[in-house]
Image: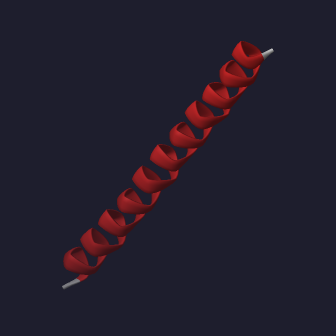
Amino acid sequence: MYGETYFKQTTSKLYYWQGAISFGIGGALLVVYIVKYFNWMN
């Protein structure tokens, strides 16, 4: 019973960190793309 609860908490944390990391990488790539686009326009 305790192991199952611990497993659920760990998987939810992993899902949260996976989403946060992918969101951070996506945001960074978006910023880089915008900067390159504006540099190309000028």
Q: Is residue 39 above or below residue 28?
A: above
Which residue is found at the position 18% from the left and 85% from the top? 1
State the colouring used for the structure image.
secondary structure
Quarter of the rendering containing residue 28: top right
Q: Is residue 41 above or below residue 27?
A: above
Residue nearer the viewer, 40 or 16: 40
Q: Is residue 35 left or right of residue 21?
A: right
Disc tally is 0
List x then y, in percent, for residue 11: 30, 64
Residue nearer the viewer, 15 or 42: 42
List x then y, in percent, for residue 25: 53, 37
Residue lying furthest front in this view?
41
List x then y, in percent, for residue 4: 20, 77
Quarter of the rendering containing residue 14: bottom left
Quarter of the rendering containing residue 2: bottom left
Q: Is residue 11 above or below residue 25?
A: below
Which residue is found at the position 41% from the left and 63% from the top? 13
Q: Is residue 40 left or right of residue 12?
A: right
Residue nearer the viewer, 23 or 8: 23
Which residue is found at the position 52% from the left and 41% from the top? 26
Which residue is found at the position 28% from the left and 80% from the top? 5
Residue lying furthest right in this view?
42
Position of the C terminus, as image quadrant, is: top right
